[in-house]
Image (spheres, rainbow, N blue to C red):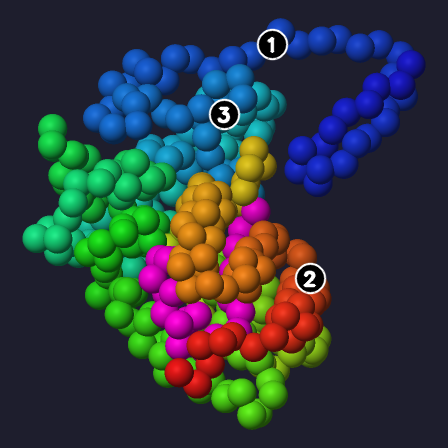
Amino acid sequence: MVVTVKDTLIDEKINIKVDLVVLATGMTPGNSEDLNLTYRQGKGLPGLKYNFPDSHFICFPYETRRTGIYAAGAIRAPGTIPACIEDATGAALKAIQCIESTKRGESVHPRSGDISYPELYMQRCTDCKRCTEECPFGSYDETEKGTPLPNPYRCRSCGICLGSCPERIINFKDFSINAVSSMIKAVHIPDEFEEKPRILAFLCENDAYPSLDIVGKYRLQYDPNIRVIPVRCLGAVNVVWIADALSMGFDGIVLIGCKHGDDYQCHYIKGSELAEQRMENVQDKLKQLVLEPERVQMFNLSLDEYNKIPTIFNDFVEEITEMGFNPYKGM
């Protein structure tokens, strides 16, 4: 008899020859709704398949979407007794880190040590509810009217609310709409007589930007006409940055972030997924500017896929070159 199992740690199927198979009783977690948490996304812990608490299994396995609440042992996933003991130790250490960071007024993982929190210019708020609905960690409550009420104790400083706001009223002291716009406008744009494109790349700081560091370490080559701006998360990219870049003459824009989906690797849970959804707004902006939709493209990769970055960059530059320069160049 051969039993085929999947090792979820290394994501490989393993065949084991056996004489006897003893099946364990199926396990499901308790009802997390009994927690009665005051989050607008629900009073319990968000769950994945079979109702186990959602957590970032790859980078922060004990973390949940509820800041300061950690799942360990059989609550997080079925496991052996030694694995559950190890889980409990890790969760306890994470809880200690969270308490210490909170005492210092700092953000918890993944931006440990960050002391910046969203600042809202409420005079221009239209109560659209984008920030309250899209924050993965429930750091915004809202009034009956729908006005956002920030809760900084839940904030992970990801900037997804900054990227979601159509009125651009949300900013951080060290990461704001104007700060990134200034970076974009500071880049030299070759004119039409230099016959070379200028490409802007937004890379998330968790997987994509470190991948670029590895590309440099191994001296992998990519087109020199790329200019890179790191962002906290692709979900933090506001459409106004793309509009600014295209209107000032950038020939194309590429966004690279973490993988999303059921086995997501986004450190902010659904930042990359939200960025992909917002691409519809980007396409509308391209239509307004009478530009080809292919001038803005988005890619997802994991840290171990760093070797894909030169191919993504080079293929994109080649495609833009064949398409032709941005007609706004030089205006």
Q: Secondary structure at mark 2?
A: helix
**Marks 1, 3: nearer the viewer:** 3
Residue 142 visible at all: yes
Q: Residue at x 54, y 62 (%)?
A: 292
Residue farthest to the bottom, as pictured: 193
Closer to the camera, 179 or 82? 179
Residue farthest to the left, as pictured: 123
Q: Which residue is mark 3?
A: 48
Q: Which residues are magenta?
A: 237-259
Position of 107 with respect to 78 (left or right) is left
Q: Secondary structure at mark 3?
A: loop
Q: Which residue is mark 2?
A: 308
**Distance from Cα at disc 1 to Cα at disc 3:** 16 Å
Looking at marks 3 and 2 on the same chain, the residue that comes earlier in the sequence is marked by 3
Q: Quadrant of residue 225?
A: bottom right
Where residue 10 sits: x, y (%)? Answer: 71, 40
Closer to the camera, 139 or 161? 161
Q: Which residue is mark 1?
A: 26
